[in-house]
Image: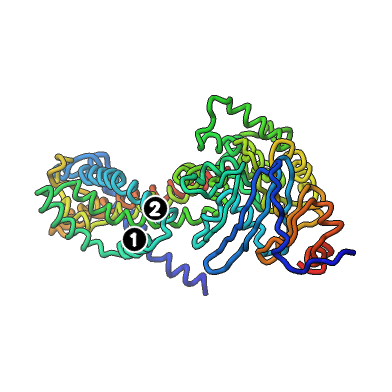
Amino acid sequence: MCLLCVIIAVIPLLSILYEVVSRGAPFLSFQFLTNDALHGGIGPSIQGTLILIGLTSLIGVPVGILSGVYLAEFGDNKYASFVRAINDVLTEFPSIVVGITTYSVVVIGIIGSFSPIAGAIALSIMLIPIVARTTDESLKLVPNSVREASLALGIHKWKTTLRIVVPAAKSGIVTGTLLAIARIAGETAPILLTILGSNYFFQGFRSPMDALPLRVFRDARWDDPRVQAEAWGVALILILIVLSLNIAVRLAARGRHKR
Amino acid sequence: MTRKNANIGKDNAEPSSSGVKMQTIDLNAWFGAKQALKDINVSFKTNAVTAIIGPSGCGKSTLIRCLNRMHELVPGSRFSGQVLLDGEDTYAPGVDPVMIRRRVGMVFQKPNPFPTMSIYDNVAAGLKLTGSKKGRDLDKVVRWSLEQATLWDEVKDDLKKAGTSISGGQQQRLCIARAIALQPEVILMDEPCSALDPIATAKIEELIVKLKEEYTVVIVTHNMQQAARVSDFTAFLYLGQLVEYGDTESIFENPRNELTEKYITGKFG
């Protein structure tokens, strides 16, 4: 019975992988990966996705981890439970709403044009609650006796948190953060309205930029069946990036357990 | 036999000023609405081992956690009274609990080495993170602390190994070394052997007796033989009150209070 359920659960995943690989693999070539869109390549999309991952991590990871630390270590008050509740809501927030809000506030209001920064802000809004929660949960797994041991030595609370408790939860925090990044790397809705998409390589922080999910979206809507088919090639690259992040996390985690 | 005083809470120890390292005055402690300690007046003598005995839930642990201001870390806890260290109130306004904890070290019931640190770093952690290195050679302090805790010979070749990789008894001695490294004046021990086997227990007990040469030791134990073996003074707590306090020999051989006698002879607890 359980085996049946497992099979039912795994079939869609495997068939997606099979479709993407079998239809996408023929497109793979050096030109395809490095040329811009006008010369039959997806270079700008790959570059854009990597820039987005970088910028989003830069904004979202510190804010997310510090929020999580606050919730877990200093969160014994009403204010923190309010923040925790909001955080849980944000985790499940519809991503298109994040996109349209960032569009109206950042793209129209602050920057005045589509921008990689707007995209990174939208993705950070998706990333922060996930990272905050995973940090919060990892820190709660650290036994209280560890905190007490440190405090009883006359080590200040903040040093205890930063130097003793956070390092003890480090592997959980790193794993959770990388998985969160892998998740938002494939988001489409928040970046559709903030970086718009582009045929060209990065053109500055006040210009539209491309990303792999947007390219899949555009290619698939094209009239030309050849361009439609190309979407599989782009999807394959996107999946490879997300999967390799996942696998890297798992390998790192396993390596740590062996030691 | 003399008539035994059946009233508890009346036999509070007379604080004698000579050689008293720590002293509590009318100490009360609560967890939420539940009062854990009632008007405790007891003193702890310099270079002596004082054992606190009593049945589970009588407030032994709460008492020693008041001595280094760890009690107040529990959410919902309250406290009243005074705890004197060298005659000065550790709860006076303006006193930083962190500074008190550096002078009054603590060893816990379960060995709790820092999980991500090596044996060496566990001992060095307190010095590094309290900024109290002050030019002392870290290697020397680590070695000295481990020697004091009679652990050096067993781990000197494995200082880089994880603190959690050694046996439970060794971990507990590591925790003692970690506390000693900061050169506290008082060492509190909260049932330090309750998670250990008899051989490891014997080693820790030997160590406790040795430690009193340089420190004032307060040990909580539910093991009366242990109290009799290691301590110079014994305080018997029951239901949050101090029933009897005196030198260990007279408490065990000639208890003045009926409750003490019953507890020591194993009639309850």
Q: In the rendered image, which quarter is residue A14 located in?
A: bottom left
- For label 1, the residue is A83
State the SS at label 1. Answer: helix
* Residue at horizontal 16 percent and vertical 60 percent from the top: A221
**Residue A173 position within the rendered picture, expressed as x and y whole percent measured from the top left:** 43, 50
Residue B209 % position (x, y)? 77, 42
* Chain ID at mark 1: A
Look at mark 2 in the image and give the residue it sits on. Answer: A70
Q: Is residue A167 in view from this perspective?
A: no
**Image quadrant in which the C terminus of chain B is located:** bottom right
On what subunit does the disc labeled 2 rest? A
Q: Residue at x 62, y 46 (%)?
A: B106
Measured from the top left, where is residue B250 in percent x and y?
83, 54
Q: Which amino acid does label 2 sit on?
A: Tyr
Pick whichever, B181 or B110, lies toward us: B181
- Of the pair A29 and B28, the residue shown nearer to us: B28
Q: Among all residues in the image, which is located at the extreme right?
A: B1
Between A63 and A147, the residue placed more toward the observer is A147
Q: In this view, does B66 lie above or below B166?
A: below
